[in-house]
Image: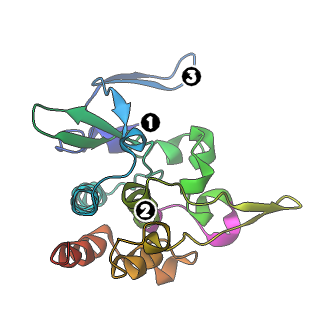
């Protein structure tokens, strides 16, 4: 059930899997992670972008292995504290697909791409991870979560992720189109890969 995860769990930014099972329900035993990235809250702009670049690079490598994470968010990244810094590590790699979608993992809907919540927007895949990276960056830059999607008579209606600089005015406006492109509702409008998103963020570091 977690072949995609175990295939990449040797990466620096992916949690190692030590055991797995299916009864009484699917489970995995991993390295201990004291807290999720969500609890880091708002980071200084440069630290936020550097962390996002690390996550983009990790997702790009996961994709090269033939797997999509499927549920990228600040809740699916754990934080390992060291003497001088912290290291973000992905959990739940590929488990959304194995367990029947992001909703089966009880994903925070504020961070889920439209296609994870409604078939109208297609299927979950690599571009869903680009969306997840974008909303995770938004969280790191602002300390906020995007708004909940609206439910109109049982019909999912996506809500645009706000511009980070509208929430934190001291942020450079150059970050806004990067977040907006990564989190576009329609998949064809997003960056075509995590690698491309990382390239844009590395260019932004020169302004921070």
- Residue farthest left in this picture: 84
Residue 1: mark in rendering: 1
Mark 1 vs mark 3: give the one in front.
3
Seen in the image, is 20 located left or right of residue 124?
left
Instruction: Let me know if residue 91 is in the magenta part.
Output: no
Quarter of the figure with residue 133: bottom left
Residue that badge 2 annotates: 138
Total number of numbered discs in the rendering: 3
Q: Is residue 23 above or below residue 171?
A: above
Residue interval drawn in magenta? 118-129
Q: Label 2's element?
A: helix
How far apart marks 1 and 3 lie (CA) works out to 11 Å
Residue 25: mark in rendering: 3
Place of residue 172 in the rendered image (x, y in percent of width and height, measured from the top left): 32, 77
Q: Earlier in the sequence, mark 3 or mark 2?
A: 3
- Residue farthest top in this picture: 24
At 26% from the left and 43% from the top, the residue drawn is: 88
Does residue 195 show up?
A: yes
Q: Residues within 10 Å of mark 1 (few under 14, many from 20)?
A: some
Nearest the eye: 193 or 184: 184
């Amino acid at each position: 059930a977690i072949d995609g995860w175990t295939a990449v769990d040797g990466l620096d930014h992916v949690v190692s899997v030590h055991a797995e099972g299916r009864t009484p329900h699917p489970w995995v035993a991993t390295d201990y992670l004291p807290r999720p990235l969500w609890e880091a809250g708002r980071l200084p702009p440069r630290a936020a972008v550097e962390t996002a670049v690390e996550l983009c690079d990790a997702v790009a490598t996961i994709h090269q292995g033939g797997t999509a994470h499927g549920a990228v968010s600040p809740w699916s990244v754990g934080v390992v504290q060291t003497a001088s810094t912290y290291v973000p590590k992905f959990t739940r790699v590929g488990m959304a697909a194995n367990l029947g979608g992001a909703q089966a993992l009880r994903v925070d809907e504020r961070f889920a791409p439209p296609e994870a919540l409604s078939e109208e927007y297609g299927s979950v895949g690599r571009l869903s991870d680009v969306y997840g990276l974008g909303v995770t960056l938004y969280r790191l830059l602002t300390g906020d979560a995007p708004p909940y999607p609206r439910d109109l008579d049982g019909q999912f209606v996506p809500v645009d992720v706000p511009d980070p600089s509208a929430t934190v005015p001291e942020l450079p406006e150059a970050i806004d189109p990067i977040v907006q492109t990564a989190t576009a509702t329609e998949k064809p409008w997003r960056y075509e890969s995590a690698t491309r998103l990382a390239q844009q963020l590395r260019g932004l570091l020169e302004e921070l």
